[in-house]
Image: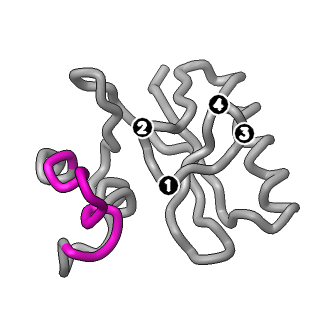
Amino acid sequence: MTLKVVTANRLGDGDVVYLTAEGAWSPWLEEARASDDEAQQATLLTIAERAVTARLVVEPYLMPVTEEAGARRALSQREKIRARGPTVRRDLGKQAEPGRQEEFRRDV
């Protein structure tokens, strides 16, 4: 089974977010609850759908990830871009956060 997390877009500002183990939404992939169990993944999607009903997020889905050297990484180029922010300017989006530049540089 593939390791997956639940991702969505926060309704208030459109930012990409990930469902955490506590049932909250975080903008950081490393804080997401990851599971390789199909039943648990279905449960995570059910929790995410409640957040849709509460108008916190839109369009949640399961996203495959990998864990390398203790860091969680998106597998597809699309999800890498969603995790980082705009590709046209590195001074915008999550890649512009202090202390995050090197983390995102490795992922390019």
The Cα–Cα distance between marks 2 and 4, rounded to whole angstroms, is: 11 Å
The mark nearer the N terminus, 2 or 3, is 3
Report the disc number at residue 21.
4
Q: Relative to 93, does residue 7 appear above or below in the rendering?
A: above
Q: Amino acid under label 1?
A: Pro
The Cα–Cα distance between marks 2 and 3, rounded to whole angstroms, is: 14 Å
The Cα–Cα distance between marks 1 and 2, rounded to whole angstroms, is: 9 Å
Which residue position is annotated with label 1? 27
The Cα–Cα distance between marks 1 and 3, rounded to whole angstroms, is: 13 Å
Which residue position is annotated with label 3? 23
Q: Dot 4 lies on which element?
A: loop
Q: Residue furthest bottom?
A: 88
Indicate left or right for 34 with 97 as reference.
Answer: right
Q: Amino acid under label 3?
A: Gly
- Segment colored magenta: 91-103
Coordinates of residue 14 in the picture (x, y in percent): 56, 74
